[in-house]
Image (cartoon, helix red, strand yellow):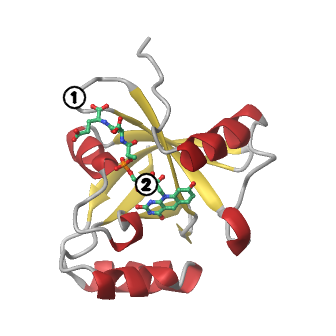
């Protein structure tokens, strides 16, 4: 089995350790925002290692919307490239774990609707898009 490599970002690694270590009963929200987080388990496209990426929980029925905002950074987060290379992921939402497949949404009505849903769930996404010249990638994750 592939090796799990924790995020080099300590606050992210800590959230994953608590969230997963408690089987989805602790560390369910982003810091002091009180807003819910999911954990996306993905595959490093260079290392092949298991990567665990916490993201804001944006639910659309049985699907989740994944926003590669990285706080409005100039570059995409590295997990963006992992998902493009290997779209099969596992998503933990509190105590539930799902096998899912992701696809990036091109500019479209579907993307606009899901972007609005994401901003509703986590309003800072709108500021992150203002802050950066790149179009922030949006994925939809669907159950397999
Ligand atoms: N980030 C978001 O973009 N959107 C969110 O909604 C979001 C919410 C959120 C909530 C809670 C929380 O704790 C964190 C949250 N984050 C959110 C931050 C998110 O979890 C990521 O930390 C952030 O997006 C940065 O992603 P990153 O993949 O760039 O992470 C870096 C720090 C990282 O882990 N780097 C690793 C490293 O060793 O430098 C590499 C990870 C990796 O995937 N490596 C690949 C491999 O093959 O293993 C190679 C990748 C390559 O292209 O080189």
Q: Is residue 71 left or right of residue 33?
A: left
Point out the frontmost of discs 1 and 2.
1
* Residue 8: mark in rendering: none
> Does label 1 point to a residue whose CB lies under 8 Å from ligand 1?
yes
Which element type, helix, strand or loop, lies under badge 2?
A: strand
Which quarter of the figure is the N terminus placed in?
Answer: top left
Residue 42, given in percent of the width and then of the height, sits at 40, 37
Residue 2 vs 13, above or below: the answer is above
Query: Label 2 near label 1: C-beta < 8 Å?
Result: no
For image coordinates 21% across by 76% down, the residue present is 135
Q: CA distance from mark 1 to mark 2?
A: 24 Å
The residue lying toward the viewer, choosing from 80 and 71, is: 71
Residue 30 vs 113, above or below: the answer is above
Residue highlighted by disc 1: 46
Residue 37, given in percent of the width and then of the height, sits at 62, 59
For image coordinates 33% across by 47% down, the residue present is 79
- For disc 2, the neighbor class at 10 Å (few under 14, some 14 to 19, many from 20) is some
Residue highlighted by disc 2: 142
Q: Is residue 24 left or right of residue 66?
A: right
Residue 5 vs 18, above or below: the answer is above
Residue 104, given in percent of the width and then of the height, sits at 26, 61
For image coordinates 58% across by 64% down, the residue present is 57
The total number of labels drawn is 2
The residue lying toward the viewer, choosing from 68 and 8, is: 8
- For disc 1, the neighbor class at 10 Å (few under 14, some 14 to 19, many from 20) is few
> Does label 2 point to a residue whose CB lies under 8 Å from ligand 1?
no
**Tag 2 or tag 1, which sits nearer the N-term?**
1
Residue 3, given in percent of the width and then of the height, sits at 44, 17
Q: Is residue 37 left or right of residue 94?
A: left
Residue 28, picture quadrant = bottom right
Which element type, helix, strand or loop, lies under badge 1?
A: loop
């Amino acid at each position: 089995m592939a090796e799990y490599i924790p995020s080099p970002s300590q606050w992210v690694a800590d959230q994953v350790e608590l969230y997963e270590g408690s089987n989805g009963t602790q560390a369910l929200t982003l810091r002091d925002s009180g807003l819910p987080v999911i954990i996306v388990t993905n595959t490093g496209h260079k290392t092949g290692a298991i990567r665990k990426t916490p993201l804001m929980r944006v639910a659309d029925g049985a699907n989740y919307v994944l926003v590669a905002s990285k706080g409005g950074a100039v570059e995409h987060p590295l997990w963006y490239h992992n998902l493009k290379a290997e779209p099969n992921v596992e998503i933990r939402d509190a105590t539930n774990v799902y096998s899912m497949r992701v696809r990036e949404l091109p500019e479209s009505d579907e993307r606009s609707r899901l972007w609005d849903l994401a901003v509703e769930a986590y309003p800072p996404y709108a500021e992150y898009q203002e802050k950066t010249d790149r179009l922030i990638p949006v994925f939809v994750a669907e159950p397999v």
